[in-house]
Amino acid sequence: MTINGKAYIVGAYEHPLRKAPNTSVSQLHAECAKGALEDAGLTKDDIDGYFCAGDAPGANVWSMANYMNLKQLRHIDSTDMGGCSYLVHVAHAAEAIALGKCNVALVTLAGRPNSEGSSGTQVRDRGANIPDAPFEMPYSPVTVNLYAMCAMRHMYQYGTTSEQLAWVKVAASHHAQHNPSAMLRNVVTVEEVVNSPMISDPLHRLDCCVVSDGGGAVIVAKPEIARSLKRPLVKITGAGESTKGQMGGNVDLTYSGAVWTGPRAFAEAGVKPSDIKYASIYDSFTITVIMQLEDLGFCKKGEGGKFVADGNLISGVGKLPFNTDGGGLCNNHPANRGGMTKILEAIRQLRGEAHPAVQVKNCDIALAHGTGGALGHRHGSATLIMERE
Amino acid sequence: MTTPAQDRKLRDPSLNPGDQPYFDACAEGKLLIKKCNDCGQTHHYPRPLCPFCFSDKVEWITTQGTGEIYTYSVTRRGGPVPYCIAYVGLTEGPKMMTNIVDCDLDAIKIGQKVKVVFKKTEGGFSVPMFTPIG
């Protein structure tokens, strides 16, 4: 059983707001759903599968399904894998469609961390009954230092430099200059990144993604429906999902769960890293990109720093154009969860609808990969491969 | 440049059933980990079922309180004072999340030998942290 060819992404929408103090989270979800349906040429009552994650009010489907008055639902999934949930959702939607459990699946993401004053240096309350919390919370783990510890080890073990990390941001900024909705549109240099304030060694402010409001949605449908619509055909061909933690104390921060999800997705899609014309790679921090590129097989372990240097991720310049919308580092990171926007830019590239300045020529195969949680303690990973038909 | 480690307010751990002996030992200046009597492996954080073989024949053992820094990061923004989060690989094997304290934060290095010290949280729990030796 495979999902290869069993489902298509027929609708996609990215919310234009980056700060939405006067728009409710439920309204943002619904506006994203509406936008994706209009993009697809479908209506609300065509939806019979609904997927959302912890960013949805109530952290499951009830509130949003009720808010949008989705009446035909026969397949629901509120799998939460943090920021990569939506990549998982698309894969699960394809599985459900392949099994005949639904025909048209809606996936939504939205949130307002920018309006709510969220920051990557905040200690987040983790709730009751978390087994690891008593052994971690006194030490103030926060998003940025959990990734910084990965970067520090990567530098120690492989000789990765701050300048190499900076190249990831530089590439993202080259793309963001063409995106009118991006929060940070100025092109930056390696020097500007390494001279920006140190947040948590070795990560500078410009090694960190933005905090933004907003959201996005996609519609996944069975082949017959996809072919009846007017949009370019984006076929789902492979997927992988996994989690990685501290392994009982055998902590190894040099690799992510992408070492498992990448090979599974490539095998299902029947392609290899060198076939990928465009890659959306989760960029919560610059180190996130370097580790995931290695783990997905775009370069050898430890050589991610060299791989990203000298503009290799810049569309039209390097070998692997990435995050041509500006990514989380420059464009947006709605709900502090970047998986949805990774899918959205991959769809634009496959449809040929990216900004002309960053559109990859003959972009027929794209990959989107995400991380949820934090690479420094526990995280989810998800990979999705799509083809233009 | 030097950045002396400063004392800071520490969050209380919200204990789950089974965690009390660990923090009781901390209050006596001892760092415990769990060891499995079936597979022989040690683990951290402590669980009642071995995370390697799922045996329930696990017991507390007292560590030497020594180890070396596997990785670390000094968080310089966001908090009232800079602090160093780290993973320390204990001499007995497991790596544990902790803070590096009582030192110059700018002189911390991966591979540095460290020993345990205990710091009080706001509510009076003792928690293990580490300081460089030698």
Image: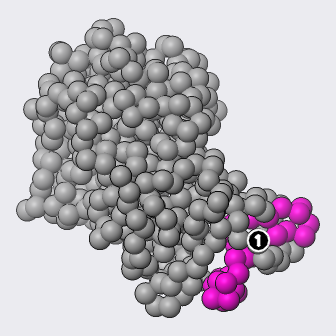
Q: What residue does disc 1 label?
A: B64
* Residue A6 visible in the current orientation: no
Q: Chain of mark 1?
A: B
Which image quarter holds the N terminus of chain A?
Answer: top right
Placement of B132 over or under A198, stated as above or below:
below
Q: Position of residue A312 (x, y in %)?
A: 37, 17
Residue type beneath disc 1? Gln
The span shown in magenta is: B19-48
Left or right position of A332 against A238: left
- Which residue, as the protein is rendered here, is positioned at the far right? B38
Q: Position of residue A257 (x, y in %)?
A: 57, 42
Residue sitting at x 55%, y 43%: A153
Q: Position of residue A381 (x, y in %)?
A: 51, 44
User: In the image, is residue B37 part of the stretch drawn in magenta?
Assistant: yes
Query: Based on the displayed image, in which of its 4 quarters is residue A323 positioned?
Result: top left
For disc 1, the neighbor class at 10 Å (few under 14, some 14 to 19, many from 20) is: some
